[in-house]
Image (tube, rainbow, N blue to C red):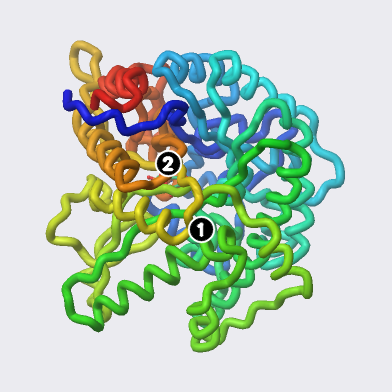
Amino acid sequence: MSKSNDQFPDGFLWGGATAANQLEGAYLEGGKGMNLADVMPGGKVRLKVISTPGFNFEIDKEKYTYPNHDGIDFYHRYKEDIALFAEMGFKAYRMSIAWSRIFPNGDELEPNEEGLAFYDRVFDECLKYNIEPVVTISHYEMPLYLIKEYGGWRSREVITFFERYATTLFNRYKTKVKYWLTFNEINGAVFHPIFGLGFSPATEDVRLQESFQGLHHQFVASSLAVKACHEIIPGSQIGCMLIYAPVYAIDCNPANVLYAFQEEQLFNYICGDVQVRGEYPAFSKRFFKENGINIKMEDEDLKIIKQYPVDFISFSYYMSRTEKKEKTAEEKAAGNIFSGVKNPFLQASDWGWEIDPVGLRLALNQLYDRYRVPLFVVENGLGAYDKIEEDGRINDDYRIDYLREHIKAMGESIEDGVELMGYTSWGCIDLVSASTGEMSKRYGYIYVDKNDDGSGTLERKKKKSFYWYQNVIATNGQEL
Ligand code: BG6
């Protein structure tokens, strides 16, 4: 056990993070409508299947399994799970609401009471233990009807549906939820629009045009949500959510350094600049022009965006990215939803995600320097295979090592002057992987007995990391 200085402020929001579609299950219960996650097959084919143009958004049980349908059955076991979070000492629980539980199709005028009541029960359970809910309004699960009938976020009409959905949540949960996030990993759409925007462009030629048009609609929707949140819940805080990876150049060749810098601007900063600074950055104009991107806007859009920026930035951090201007297919590194080239100084997880705690310190400093708003690390963690020993224990020291080094990096950045609100590590309880639909890619402090083929008792078991994290929280990050 190593000791750090007293770096983490009082009230630091230690906890864990999940998303509705990856753990709730009960995909047809409680009046819920179908959503994107319900048609995402399990296994490594997932990303390819859903992002192939022409994908019909239908279930095909002859060919695939659908692990999100049952998840880990949080829908029925949330009390047991939240009790375990409380036992670890969580101060915060980042979770998401399934849009299609509240508006089954997405475009209704009235919400589904059964869906609203479910989240009331979940929030009450959290509050019983003084766990602060941190709620993502949209996390990779757009109602399927909006995808099929409206073409996802391509359509401007979706802004109104989202605004209605967000406003419904603020009104209903105004006494229970203070922290809100609008769109999960909004900038991920630059690489894979399917998860966040609910469509895959038909050809590479229109990919950037359609993705940035969809993002623009989300920017307006997000600002309208910020406005509503502040009006309805005084004292609330609402943030954007980015997937953040500092981009390193492979060497000091200025051409590679410039390329890495430009990738960083494009991927890491456009969304943050719009959502925090309230305007498209200077560099975006040239990028849009040179790539034939022409965003259709209405007169008020830029005013709305300027007037209602977010209060804080939340982000996921799993890895850094290393770039080279000219790279061959063999040089590409496997990555989360983006990939650069392999970094010779870094080890990778079993899924090829490069492990780089220093990158988290950089990320925090870069974001704070640029935006000067509080930051919140709402996802971070190691997806790994776990083994149950003969004595029943799960000794996940590799996970503890990963988390320890990343928490140390956060401590360093707080000393660097960064204002950090909290840390909710990803998948605090094992759940279905977003990119592969596997159960065997586990992140949790709590093991769930469920296998990739769907078999298992769903029994929950505490891993070694459960006790370790419990102590981290109890000592406010002083004992790592
Ligand atoms: C983030 C997502 O990209 O990474 C989560 O917000 C996801 O939904 C997490 O689960 C880890 O990715 P994966 O593919 O290992 O589940």
Query: Residue 251: horizontal and vertical position, in percent?
Result: 16, 73
Do we see residue 458 in this rendering?
no
Q: Residue at x 49, y 82 (%)?
A: 287
- Compared to residue 445, the image places residue 420 above or below, namely below
Q: Residues within 10 Å of mark 1 (few under 14, many from 20)?
A: many
Query: Residue 266: horizontal and vertical position, in percent?
Result: 44, 71
Residue carrying label 1: 50
Q: Residue furthest left?
A: 344
Query: Residue 2: horizontal and vertical position, in percent?
Result: 17, 27
Q: Residue furthest right?
A: 109
Residue carrying label 2: 420
Q: Are marks 1 and 2 in contact (CB under 8 Å)?
A: no
Please state which amino acid type lies under the numbered disc 1: Ile
Q: Residue at x 56, y 46 (%)?
A: 139
Q: Nearer the viewer, residue 363 or 31?
A: 363
Position of the C terminus by quadrant: top left
Q: Residue at x 49, y 35 (%)?
A: 18
Query: Dot 1 lies on which element?
Result: helix
Query: Dot 2 lies on which element?
Result: strand
- Asked if residue 260 lies left or right of residue 237, the reply is left
Residue 264: quarter of image: bottom left
- Asked if residue 129 lies left or right of residue 459, the reply is right
Q: Nearer the viewer, residue 462 or 231?
A: 231
Q: Residue at x 24, y 34 (%)?
A: 404
Q: Residues within 10 Å of mark 2 (few under 14, many from 20)?
A: many
- Compared to residue 116, the image places residue 292 above or below, namely below
Please state which amino acid type lies under the numbered disc 2: Leu
Disc number for residue 258: none
